[in-house]
Image: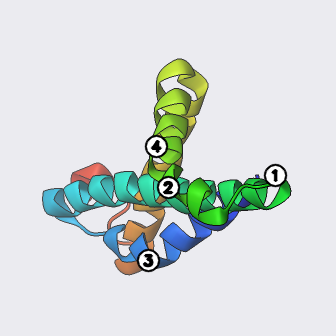
Amino acid sequence: MLSAAAGAGFAGVFLADGFGRARWRGQVLGLVSAIAATVMGALVGSAIALSVAAATVPNATVIEALEIVPLFGFVAILDGLTNSVPVAVTWALSMAAVQMWLLRVRHGGRATSAASI
């Protein structure tokens, strides 16, 4: 959980600017940012987790662990989003909430509904 939180935080810092834009282009950018943040967060989180795991296994190197990070990160994302409806729904709702909240923050509370975008 700690490595996942660190990965999500890292991705959020770099991709937060993609959320909260108005109009249809802003919605598309928000969707792309949500997907990119999820992928980046999974890659960073799995890199941390596998590095720590490699450090505890005799004769394993961190480089060997980092070589499988992309595969491990994508497997974690696909498994979570395709095998568990609650996970997929929670992800979609949380990304939509971030988009709507930042839309409201950026536009001073004026654009609070889809009709006003």
Q: Does residue 65 appear left or right of residue 99 in this picture? A: right
Give the distance between the C-alpha atoms of the residues marked 4 and 3, in whole angstroms: 22 Å
- Residue receiving disc 4: 71
Give the distance between the C-alpha atoms of the residues marked 3 and 2, in whole angstroms: 23 Å
Q: Amino acid at mark 3?
A: Phe
Give the distance between the C-alpha atoms of the residues marked 2 and 4, in whole angstroms: 9 Å
The secondary structure type at the circle numbered 1 is loop
Report the mark closest to the observer, 1 or 3. Answer: 1
* Residue 15 placement (x, y as % from top left): 40, 72
Q: Amino acid at mark 4?
A: Leu
Q: Residue at x 58, y 31 (%)?
A: 87
Q: Amino acid at mark 2?
A: Glu
The secondary structure type at the circle numbered 2 is helix
- Residue receiving disc 2: 67
- Residue receiving disc 3: 14
Q: Does residue 77 appear left or right of residue 57 in this picture? A: left
Q: Amino acid at mark 1?
A: Val
Mark 3 and mark 2 lie on one chain; the one further toward the N terminus is 3
Q: Is residue 31 above or below residue 51?
A: above
Give the distance between the C-alpha atoms of the residues marked 2 and 1, in whole angstroms: 16 Å
